[in-house]
Amino acid sequence: MPFLGQDWRSPGQNWVKTEDGWKRTAADGRNSNNVSAERCVAESFNKENLLFSLSYDMAARKRKKDLMNNNSKIPYFHREKWIYVHKGSTKERHGYCTLGEAFNRLDFCSAIKDTRRFNYVVRLLELIAKSQLPSLSGVAQKNYMNILERVVQKVLDDQQNVRPIKELLQMLYVSLCGLVQDMGKSVLVGNINIWVHRMENILQWQQQLDSIQINRPTSTGMALTELPASLQLNIMQRLSDGRDLVSLGQVCPELGSLAEDRLLWKKLCQYHFTDRQICKRLMLSDKGHLEWKKMYFKLSRCYPLREQYSDTLHLCTHCHILFWKDTNHPCTANNPESCTTALSPQDFINLFNF
């Protein structure tokens, strides 16, 4: 059916089917001269509108391109609390959701400002740097570097979580050293000079983290060393990383003696590893006691540590929506809580493995 205008959903003209064929209705009946004249005027008017709309679209695309090229500090992505994860094409929806699209659309910039989500996002960045960086689109790779820069700046300002960020930067630098050598094989998106410049930024961030000076807090409250030994030991039991215990034991001799408590390291081993894993790596001292501290570091080199996060991404199995734990999503299930499953950073990566 012929129509006027750029939108195919425009009403056009009213036609009815008769015995002699298709004819216009009486409301549209006009003499041929008027119809041809109006059609010429309408065509010229629509051509002007079409040229105007095309020029406007080209200007909008040019502004968006200039923004992304000239202002690389501002990541270009949607700030959404949830996204629909679809893995295939249907009659209602074409295409599928990729890891890069999910990384762009979910609001990770605000997530790193939340203490509950910080470790989750850092672990996700570490997994992407380890093996998933080539699978990201060009915009997603740029957003990855921008979010990483914000993470480093937050650590420099707060003077917390220095060690995991240094490990993340080291892993990313090693991965990029291998990927840059294969630039001609469509491994990374963009010019090689851009990635060399990004690698230089990573080295600069590492130097800033190495030269960071932890300032002593100005609070006049009670210090950790002033607490009773039972409370100090109770606080140590809340730490889930053995390296933090070692660092805490280097503060003073009193904390150093508490950090060598065998029961403390035993609970740490039982928290991260199974009984079968522990039995395979038994270590006895000269007196016949189990060396739980040595066993912990030996087990940590053989098996992954148990991950625990205050806030994680969740997946609704009913409506296939990925969302943060403390945000709502438009779920149509009668009992939305029964359809929700928590996703670890590795589960988030595996969700997009097709």
Image (cartoon, helix red, strand yellow):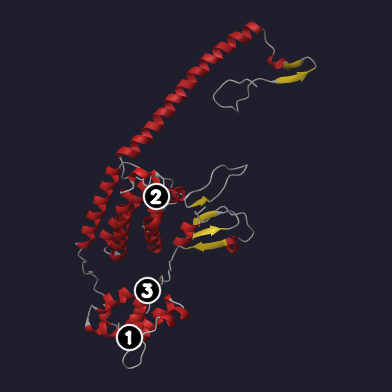
Q: Residue at x 71, y 20 (%)?
A: 15
Residue 160 in view (yes/no): no
Residue type at mark 1 is Asp
Residue occupying the point 30% across, 61% down: 165
Residue named by callout 2: 134
Mark 2 or mark 3: name the one nearer the start of the chain: 2
User: Tag 2, which secondary structure?
Assistant: helix
Report which residue position mark 3 lands on.
300
The local secondary structure at tag 3 comes to: helix
Residue 131 visible in the picture:
yes
User: Is 137 above or below relative to 262?
Assistant: above
* Mark 3: amino acid: Ser
The residue that disc 1 covers is 261
Query: Is 223 on the left-hand or right-hand side of 77?
Result: left
Q: What kind of element bears circle 1?
A: loop
Q: Toward the viewer: 25 or 345? A: 345
